Image: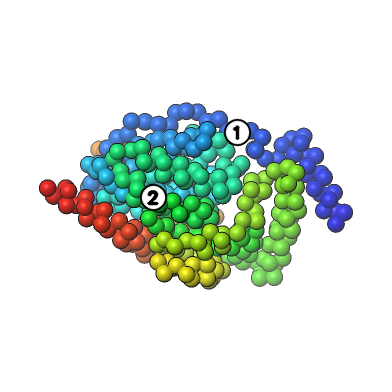
């Protein structure tokens, strides 16, 4: 016990001297993101969509986000995309998102505070703070007259699936897609990730478990400092339990797991998620074979493998070799990697079913 207190004392002193967390400094990014938008002909579908870089106000901060809608739409329903941990943001013009656009559904890919050019700092946020950012995105959608901000499906990936159930009772939210959704307490999810990843890297089960326990002891000691000083962003989320919010979720929800994901392995999380949602008769669960954490077809599933999954420059049926937008899209990583079969189809089918009435009304209006 004395060693633990000595460790905490040393950490606190170091933090006071050199700073352990960016919590001391609110990031002030360059205000260069928003534009007037432009229309792009999708080289995959041949249909046009409107793309715009926007700022979503959240409190005193601005979150850089990407808004897309079908080019001629004035009342499209929306899929709001919430990304996972750290500073990663899902690709706005992915195959899934462009396919939804072609079928009449708008997409808003929400950024994160502190990820340039956004202001603020995601490292200072709890999951409840991040949930308020999602509500702010819903408020922003309501300011637009080219989409239906009352008809929104939220797609949340990885850590984003901890966040969105916290605000899912908002009446504008019609349904949730929880992809690679952790159901364990954050502390245990980190442990599981470590065991699974080390095992796939060749360690024996005993060595992998030992390393994970050692890491957990270190993080436990580190977070002991949190009440005194926020030494790490884990201070805000380390003991978060998703169970209470999930048990209250009554709206339609599609829970997706990837069969080759060491970070959120389905054999650990699916049984928990099914138990938490057992009273929700609108919940459905799918495991995508072969998919890694990003739902890309994979061998090991490890992040170290990601870069090797990039295939040749993408080809599209409606590509124009002289169109710079088509060249840009063909070179995007998300368009060059092979998605796991069944992933896009599962999301599309679910989202279109939720928006069935709205899409039918739009089709009737367009036919007049």
State the image coordinates of residue 295 (x, y, percent, origin top left): 44, 59
The alpha-carbon separation of the residues under discs 1 and 2 comes to 31 Å
**CB of mark 1 within 8 Å of CB of mark 2?**
no
Residue 331 shown left or right of residue 363 in the figure: right
Q: Earlier in the sequence, mark 1 or mark 2?
A: 1
Tag 1 secondary structure: loop
Asked whether the viewer can see residue 364, the reply is yes
Within 10 Å of disc 1 (Cα), the crowding (few <14, some 14-19, many 20+) is some
Give me the residue at 52% from left, 70% from top.
275
> In which quadrant of the rendered image does the N terminus lie?
bottom right
Q: Which mark is residue 106?
A: none
In the image, 159 versus 357, the foreground residue is 357
State the image coordinates of residue 311 (x, y, percent, origin top left): 40, 53
In the image, 185 versus 44, the foreground residue is 185
Give me the residue at 55% from left, 69% from top.
272
Residue 366 shown left or right of residue 193 in the figure: left
State the image coordinates of residue 106 (x, y, percent, origin top left): 32, 47
Residue 197 shown left or right of residue 16 in the figure: left
Q: Is residue 278 above or below residue 320?
A: below
Res 20 quadrant in image: top right
Farthest residue, direction right: 2
Res 55 quadrant in image: top left
Q: Which mark is residue 172?
A: 2
Farthest residue, direction left: 368
Tag 2 secondary structure: loop
Residue under pointer 1: 26
């Amino acid at each position: 016990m004395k060693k633990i207190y000595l460790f905490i004392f040393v950490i606190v002193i170091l933090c006071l001297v050199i700073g352990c967390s960016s919590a001391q400094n609110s990031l002030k990014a360059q205000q260069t993101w928003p534009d007037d938008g432009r229309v792009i002909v999708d080289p995959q579908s041949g249909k046009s969509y409107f793309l715009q870089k926007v700022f979503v106000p959240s409190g005193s901060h601005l979150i850089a986000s990407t808004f897309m809608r079908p080019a001629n739409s004035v009342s499209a329903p929306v899929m709001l995309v919430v990304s996972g941990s750290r500073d990663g943001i899902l690709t706005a013009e992915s195959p899934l998102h462009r396919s939804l656009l072609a079928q009449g559904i708008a997409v808003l890919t929400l950024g994160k505070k502190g990820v340039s050019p956004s202001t603020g700092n995601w490292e200072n946020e709890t999951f409840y703070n991040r949930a308020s950012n999602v509500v702010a995105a819903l408020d922003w959608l309501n300011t637009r007259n080219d989409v239906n901000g009352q008809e929104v499906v939220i797609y949340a990936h990885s850590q984003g699936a901890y966040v969105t159930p916290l605000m899912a009772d908002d009446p504008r939210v019609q349904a949730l897609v929880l992809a690679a959704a952790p159901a364990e307490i954050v502390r245990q999810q980190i442990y599981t990730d470590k065991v699974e990843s080390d095992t796939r890297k060749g360690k024996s089960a005993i060595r992998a478990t030992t390393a994970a326990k050692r890491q957990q002891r270190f993080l436990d000691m580190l977070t002991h400092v949190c009440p005194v000083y926020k030494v790490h962003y884990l201070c805000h989320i380390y003991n978060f339990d998703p169970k209470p919010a999930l048990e209250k979720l009554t709206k339609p929800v599609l829970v997706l797991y990837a069969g080759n994901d060491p970070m959120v392995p389905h054999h650990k999380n699916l049984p928990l998620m099914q138990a938490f949602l057992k009273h929700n008769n609108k919940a459905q669960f799918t495991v995508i074979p072969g998919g890694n954490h990003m739902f890309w077809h994979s061998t090991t599933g490890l992040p170290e493998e990601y870069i090797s999954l990039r295939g040749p420059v993408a080809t599209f049926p409606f590509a124009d070799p002289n169109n710079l937008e088509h060249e840009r899209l063909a070179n995007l990583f998300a368009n060059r990697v092979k998605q796991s079969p069944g992933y896009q189809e599962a999301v599309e089918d679910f989202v279109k079913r939720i928006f069935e009435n709205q899409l039918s009304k739009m089709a009737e209006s367009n036919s007049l």
